Image (cartoon, rainbow, N blue to C red):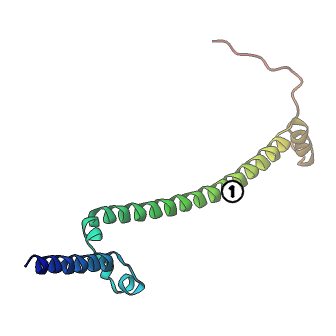
């Protein structure tokens, strides 16, 4: 009887060892077939895996939006540079046209009665 019990215990031990090695053994078939998700480890760690998946999705979306913002910043900087150069050009043109010598020259070509004042300007006090 003891011998039968020992033989049964050994057989049960061998079967449990085979099941354990079979459960721990991962093959491409079990990976692609989805059997790996039925594994005890994956069932226990489901919440952790979902949390990691959410973080990965958040990381990817954050990186994408950051790249889009950098592209927009570069585009706006180019536009700003163009506007600054245009404003500088217009400012220099205005300075050139508003010089006294240019104004006197323009008035002389228009045959106007306007003349340059010979008296210095004076301040009116209240």
| Vertical arrangement, residue 54 with respect to residue 26, above or below | above
At 72% from the left edge and 49% from the top edge, which residue is drawn?
84
The residue that label 1 is drawn on is 78
Give the camera-side residue of 104 and 28.
Answer: 28
Could you tell me which residue is drawn at 88 percent across and 34 percent down? 115
Q: Residues within 10 Å of mark 1 (few under 14, many from 20)?
A: few
Quadrant in which the N terminus appears:
bottom left
User: Is 95 left, or right, of 123 in this rendering?
Assistant: right
Whole-percent x and y of residue 14? Answer: 25, 79
Residue 83 at x, y percent in the picture = 70, 53
Q: Is residue 115 above or below residue 8?
A: above
Rendered-image quadrant of the C terminus? top right
- Secondary structure found at label 1: helix
Relative to the observer, which residue lies in front, 24 or 49? Answer: 24
Q: Residue at x 92, y 48 (%)?
A: 109
- Nearer to us in this view, 74 or 11: 11
| Residue 72 x/y as whole percent | 58, 59
């Amino acid at each position: 009887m003891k011998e039968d019990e020992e033989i049964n215990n050994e057989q049960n031990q061998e079967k449990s060892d085979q099941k354990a090695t079979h459960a721990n053994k991962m093959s491409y078939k079990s990976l692609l077939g989805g059997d790996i998700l039925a594994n005890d480890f994956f069932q226990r760690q489901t919440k952790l895996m979902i949390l990691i998946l959410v973080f990965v999705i958040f990381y990817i979306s954050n990186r994408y939006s950051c790249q889009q913002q950098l592209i927009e910043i570069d585009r706006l900087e180019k536009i700003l540079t163009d506007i600054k150069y245009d404003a500088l050009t217009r400012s220099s043109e205005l300075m050139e046209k508003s010089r006294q010598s240019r104004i006197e020259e323009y008035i002389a070509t228009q045959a106007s009665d306007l003349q340059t004042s010979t008296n210095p300007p004076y301040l009116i006090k209240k």
